[in-house]
Amino acid sequence: MKKTSGDPSALAAVIEFPRMRVGISVESEAVTGIRYLPPETALMAPESNLAERAVRQIERYRDDPDAVFGLPLHPSGTNFQRDVWRQISAIPRGRVRTYGELARRIGGEARAVGQACGDNPFPIVVPCHRVVAADGLGGFSHHVDGYLLEAKKWLLKHEGNLQMYETGQLWREASEARE
């Protein structure tokens, strides 16, 4: 039986990360998924050289938000989802875009962009945490509370958005982007 990236037994590594754990799935020569997991999830040493490489790069990012990723990714998804993920990948560190702004750029609706963000198979590497609602944080990985929202806050702060987040400047910036 083939394992799928949604299957916990398909994980090739689980690492510690602020506010959560991060699971990595690999198949053959490509990373097939990165998943946010509850903080109580058991850690798991990398099962392969590729999983070890992914772990090292994600840990490097955890310590330095300017770290660059160079992983072979095997994305699946609709054309619309892949368009959203390309747009997300173009958002510079320390900046945010709104769901609505991305929707206007690629032709679609903000809710559909939000769903595509939630379906992102490579969070952190494809930084969906940089997409926010026009009037607040928005959701994260199909959730609006709990450890995932705390993880989104941490990621935004980690990338230099601490003061912007705490002062509300993120939302002013997002509102200005709508105009």
Image: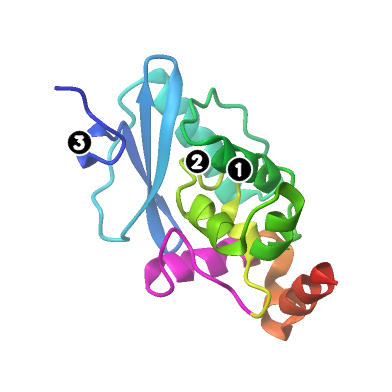
Q: Earlier in the sequence, mark 2 or mark 1?
A: 1
Give the crowd class for mark 2: few <14, some 14-19, many >=20 residues within 10 Å: many
Residue 119, position in %: x, y?
A: 45, 48
Disc 2 and disc 1 in contact, CB within 8 angstroms? yes
Residue 36, position in %: x, y?
A: 39, 52
Would residue 154 appear left or right of 12 to someone viewing this image?
Answer: right
Q: Earlier in the sequence, mark 1 or mark 3?
A: 3
Identify the residue under disc 3: 9
Mark 2 → mark 1, Cα distance in angstroms = 9 Å
| Quarter containing the C terminus | bottom right
Give the crowd class for mark 1: few <14, some 14-19, many >=20 residues within 10 Å: many
Q: Residue at left 20%, top 36%?
A: 9
Describe the element under mark 3 as helix, strand or loop.
Answer: helix
Q: How many marks?
A: 3
Residue 127, position in %: x, y?
A: 60, 49
Mark 2 → mark 3, Cα distance in angstroms = 18 Å
* Residue 151 within the magenta-colored segment of the rendering: yes
Reply above or below: 133 against 14.
Answer: below
Reply above or below: 69 against 160.
Answer: above
Q: Residue at left 44%, top 58%?
A: 141
Identify the residue under disc 1: 85
Residue 99, position in %: x, y?
A: 64, 62
Amino acid on which disc 2 is placed: Phe
* Residue 175 within the magenta-colored segment of the rendering: no
Comparing 35 with 135, the one in front is: 135
Please name which of the two marks, 2 or 1, marks the residue nearer to the observer. Answer: 1
Identify the residue under disc 2: 122
Q: Quadrant of residue 125?
A: top right
| Magenta part of the chain | 136-156
Describe the element under mark 2 as helix, strand or loop.
Answer: loop
Q: Residue at left 63%, top 71%?
A: 133
Q: Earlier in the sequence, mark 2 or mark 3?
A: 3
